[in-house]
Amino acid sequence: MTEQKDRQKRVAVIQDMSGFGRCSLTVALPLLSAKGICACPLPTAILSNHTGYPSFYFYDFTEQISAYVEEWRKMALFFDGIYIGFLGSEEQIGLVERFIRDFKREDTLVILDPVMGDHGETYATYTSAMCREIRNLVAKADILTPNLTEACILTGREYRQKGWKRKELQELAEDLTDRGAGKIVITGIEQGSFVSNFYYERDGEAGFIRRKKTAKSRPGTGDVFASLVAADSVNGMDFPGAVAEAADFVRACLIESERQRIPLEDGVCFERFMYLKRTCAARGSGRGREL
């Protein structure tokens, strides 16, 4: 049977579900849907709210994942994208590797957002063994979206907050492509009054997408950024354009969240901008442009 060429795109989204706090699946599902993609969640854990709050309920979904995925196998589902976020254990990393083996087709994009740490520190949930396993998962990623901390963890390099030169960042990105990833964007690089994202493609194209700092960093902005890069890439946008659109969208969300005096831990009010089909960056490549 010939596959319909104009059918709706479908992406499996493998992340935790936090009921409050705007992160992970509660960010990824609406943003992918707004891009016209059928977003199919595979939860790794269920939380009442994200762990940045003083207390939270946590339910580990590991034991249920195999039975959950088996039903998708029975349905002979296939995906245009497999988008992977927070993973909570070595076992989950192994289950994701199996998922990729079973569901990835020749034209399926694997997008990995390696949620491992920030501000120079590895998250408390991540063991050294998990870090090793995530490095193996990098080899299966077509697109990798680490922040600067995570890029350093994955490559074993020493982290520093500021002072990164282009040559150093390109070497960092090249190291990650040598490990198997096809396209890299290293996010959240401080450069004076700007926040930069350094993108690199295996064919050698590289550059900065810079935006002026507008407000304090908030939880979930990395999830917003990675979700938009995933959606636009699955929809066929060029990689620099996808990175630029994501940067513009996050910046707009940060400005609006501060204007509305939303508490930092509540994330960004991305809902305000979901009606916009395309941001300014999408109308051009947006490369290096400042808003």
Image: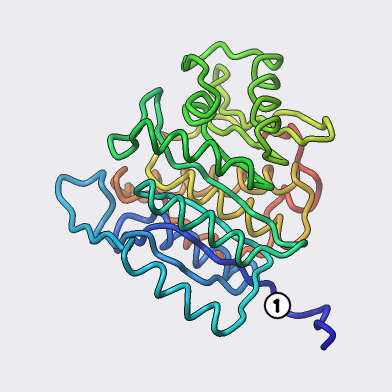
The residue lying toward the viewer, choosing from 117 and 62, is: 62
Query: Residue 175: x, y in percent?
Result: 66, 25
* Element on which disc 1 rests: loop
Residue for point 67% across, 48% down: 245
Q: How is the image coloured?
A: rainbow
Residue for point 18% across, 54% down: 56
Judge left or right: residue 211 versus residue 208: left
The residue lying toward the viewer, choosing from 225 and 264, is: 225
Judge left or right: residue 15 versus residue 51: right
Query: Residue 248: x, y in percent?
Result: 62, 45
Q: Which quadrant, please, contains the C terminus?
A: top right
The residue lying toward the viewer, choosing from 80 and 118, is: 80
Q: Which quadrant, please, contains the N terminus?
A: bottom right
In this view, the residue farthest toward the bottom is 1
Q: Quadrant of residue 167?
A: top right
Judge left or right: residue 52 versus residue 94: left
Query: Residue 129: x, y in percent?
Result: 39, 35
Residue for point 77% across, 61% down: 106
The amino acid pointed to by label 1 is Gln
The residue lying toward the viewer, choosing from 76 and 188, is: 76
- What is the crowding at mark 1: few (fewer than 14 residues within 10 Å), some, or many (at least 20)? few
Residue for point 56% across, 28% down: 195
In this view, the residue farthest toward the left is 55
Q: Is residue 79 above or below residue 191?
A: below
According to the picture, the residue beneath numbered tag 1 turns out to be: 8
Q: Is residue 99 above or below residue 159?
A: below
